[in-house]
Amino acid sequence: MKKLIAIFLVGLVFLSFGSQAASWEMLWDKQVGKVVVDHNLIDNTVRLFATDKATGDLYSYNDRSDGWTRASDRAKSFVSSGEGLFRLSSDGMKTSRYVVPENWEILPGGSALTLIGGGNKLYSTKSPYKDLYEYTGASFKLIKDGRGKAFAAGGCQECSNPDNLGYIYRIAEDGQSVWMYPKSKGELKWEEIGGPASAIYAGAGNLAPSVFAVDPVTGTLWHYKGVAAWDQVGYSGKMWAVDIIVDGYSLKETLYGLTPSGNDIYLWRGNPDPDDWTKIDTTDLNKPLQSIYAGGGQLYAVASGGRLWKYVP
């Protein structure tokens, strides 16, 4: 990252000063593909979706009946905006909003290459130049100078307000810089905030921006909070999952990291110290873990063999 110090670590992944013992509950005894945690930032409800790896079909989980209901056939992608679930058709020609299982509302002008969701906002990239668009509720509006290698969306001021700000972050097409939009409230333009980066994850960012970025050289994780400097908050990981929790009119964020081996999960609660992580007990799970997901105070993991598990503190 620009403004970041390159730190090389040999053999060190996470240092933990505590551990958190609990249990895990298997939610689906079949191989899953993609998992989407649809956390609504307005009413703080959480809906869990997952695709059947064999068919690509999307299923919705009912925690009361402990059952799964088919919600959609195969699609190119499914994303949560923080206010709803959206899908991009397999041919990329239609974007739809989830209503109930097997019922989707087609959005106008929804042809896209990719969908990006977060902060109560839906974005898409479109051909032929991979330009970035924001869905306004009536159409997709071009965001000028928004081309990028990767995107992450999150944050909102007063999430119950439909005109909330929200932020979207992008890695430049050459991977050498990280940008934020909008620059600030009332300034609808991009601001360069760091770089280079190999991946980015949007945080809560209700009063100020919040984004995590992975250094492409060291694999270390850094956090930007709207000030000039970045804080190193973690070492290398296989993947990361940001959990945003609504607390009245404010948002709180926690972060989970999966170690490169896939054997351990660690929890970070906001201290700008790369050694201040708590280990989550994963004794019940088959290793190595394939992936982790979080939202609304819930943590999920896909274990070896593709089974989906929920963490029960």
Image (cartoon, rainbow, N blue to C red):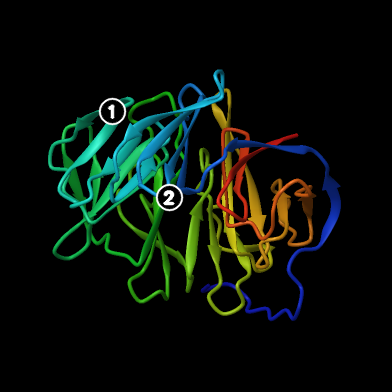
Q: Residue 19: where, in percent of width, then height?
A: 84, 48
Residue 53, labelled with which disc? 2
Q: Is residue 203 left or right of residue 24?
A: left
Q: Which residue is mark 1?
A: 102
Q: Residue 145: where, in percent of width, then height?
A: 24, 62
Residue at point 79%, 49% (across, down): 283
Question: In this orientation, does residue 184 appear?
Answer: no
Going from N to C along the chain, the mark reached first, 1 or 2, is: 2
Is disc 1 surrounded by few (<14), some (14 to 19) or many (20+) residues within 10 Å?
Answer: few
Q: Is residue 184 left or right of residue 249?
A: left
Q: Nearer the viewer, residue 299 or 2?
A: 299
User: What is the secondary structure assignment of the residue under circle 1?
Assistant: loop
Residue 174, labelled with which disc? none
Q: Amino acid at mark 2?
A: Lys
Residue at point 49%, 70% (across, down): 197
Q: Is residue 117 left or right of residue 230?
A: left
